[in-house]
Amino acid sequence: MLFQSKLVWAAVATLCLAFFLQGLFASRVKSPTSDEPTHIMAGASYIATARIVANPQHPPLMKELAGLSLALAGIRWRNTTGTPLENWPADGEWAAGNRFLAESGVVRTLFWARFPLLLLSSSIGLLIFWWGRELAGPAAGLGALFLFAADPTMVAHGYLVTTDAGVTNLSLLFLLGLYRYFRKPGMGRLAGAGVVLGLALCAKFSAVFLLPIAAALLAANCFWPVSRPERAERPSIVTLASDMAVLSLVAIVVIQICYLSPRGPLLYLHGLGQVNADHTDVFRAYLGGQIKHRFTTYFAVAWLLKEPLATIVLALAGAVVAFRSRAIPRLAKLFLLVPPVVFFVACTVWADDLGVRYEMPALVFGYLAGGIALAALLHGRTVYRALAIVACAWVTMAAAGIYPDHLSYFNEAACLPSHLEGIGWDGGTRCGPDWLADSNVDWGQSLPQLKAWLDRNAPGRTVRLEYFGSFPPADYGIRFEKADPFIVPVPPPGLYAISSHWIPYAALINGAAWLREEPEAIAGHAYYIFEF
């Protein structure tokens, strides 16, 4: 038994390390995404000034981690603009972020800013294993961890200095802490869950939906307590209210600490009101050949196309197995159901249609359900074990085939039914821009790979570039002039590099049919190269 336990923990460590190494090596060939310069600059300013001023539309915790890592590496921020932070315009934050990265050395600064975020996201794997083991045993936990470790979306966003991986980690940790409190009530466990709740709220504003999730699960515990002595009274409404009050009060204290001020809750509410303040009203999302302000099916389609097909099938099958299981307590089933449903509905109703990354707190519950399905298959007949092996191989191929361009991944369904020739080792990524845009395909992350392609195939030439990002391509040594396919539907002769984000928009809005032709090359799964 001890030997089996050691093998299990060795497998856990191996899978977490595999996730970490994928992110570490991929990050070394990736430029800053659109949001990273301002997040990194803001975090460095928090550490340098002990004040939370810049970038208020996102909570400070993830930025503070990046800023602290930079300070420990000897990379410090100074306000060289002569203008107080309070008076900066929003676009001034992006310019200051780009300048900070360039002056500090973009490669070195990115490495140290991203490093703590990569560690944090890698620990999601440990939480997923813990949750899976709690629900259905070690095999289910390992299966769930495997699906997480090989998931392109999680790897892509795991190392970025943004908020999505952080809120995913802390939401999962909070729910685990709450579940363990239900199993063995105690003020220490409840206060610990409150601390994690406060940290989650300071990671991303979407964590506010943990409050109704917690209230619903506390109420469910009144009817279906997960572990109580037979003669003990069921938790009452008074207990529910007092538990919710403790969670909230502890979380408020944590918010004050993270905001470096007793006014933390007020600063938090002010920031909450600034969410998407930098998004213009003219923004229109793209989905499957249409452009609209919002699509009700956007996040459902994103999940169906951006997750490996084997993971989707396992998640759906595992949900059925879990809810039919008599071994899993009813309350545990609600922990598996309520959080992803609430997060998904919240994305659909309130989030801008910008990317599958908004669904990450919900995606991890799909891995948990998939782990339960894998465990059931592995404990079944030979044919079922063979199916489990095929599914795992499929997921592994998705991770290996798209490396290091995980952010652009699409599964094979993106090329069905009319573009079967687009399916390859990277799934259906070649057909991704037919369906989605923005951070699903390109977020400004592949400038080094574009530079490498130009150096090999067009040395000394100036490229006409239509870029989707915030960090200046010239800082990577790319000689370019702006190409605007929205203005010029028929391009003059030259070498063009067009971001995959802009291809569907330009083709639809301005009839730039040449963007639908087969490109000469694709750099980093993000830049489509054309020669005219």
Image (cartoon, rainbow, N blue to C red):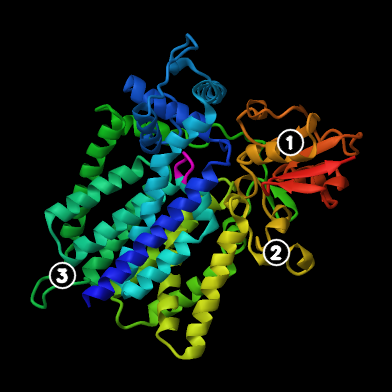
Question: Which quadrant is home to the C terminus?
Answer: top right
For mark 1, what is the residue?
A: 455
Residue 119 place in picture, x, y as percent? 38, 47
Mark 1 or mark 3, which is nearer to you?
1
Q: Residue at 44% across / 48% down in the picture?
A: 165
Q: Secondary structure at mark 2?
A: loop
In the drawing, does residue 299 fall left or right of residue 427? left
Task: Classify residue 331 by image quadrant.
Answer: bottom left
455 up-or-down from 175: above or below: above
Residue 294 place in picture, x, y as percent? 63, 49
Instruction: Answer with mark 1 or mark 2, whichever residue precedes in sequence.
Output: 2
Q: Residue at 42% across / 16% down in the picture?
A: 78
For mark 3, what is the residue?
A: 234
* Residue found at the far top of this picture: 82
In whole angstroms, how far apart are the C-alphas of marks 1 and 3? 69 Å
Instruction: Answer with mark 2 or mark 3, whichever residue precedes in sequence.
Output: 3
Q: Amino acid at mark 1?
A: Asp
Instruction: Answer with mark 1 or mark 3, whichever residue precedes in sequence.
Output: 3
In whole angstroms, how far apart are the C-alphas of marks 1 and 2? 26 Å
Q: Nearer the viewer, residue 200 or 419?
A: 419
Task: Classify residue 466 by image quadrant.
Answer: top right
Q: Residues within 10 Å of mark 1 (few under 14, many from 20)?
A: few
In whole angstroms, how far apart are the C-alphas of marks 2 and 3? 55 Å
34 up-or-down from 167: above or below: above
Extent of the magenta region: 159-163
Residue 274 place in picture, x, y as percent? 47, 32
For mark 2, what is the residue?
A: 424
229 up-or-down from 385: above or below: above
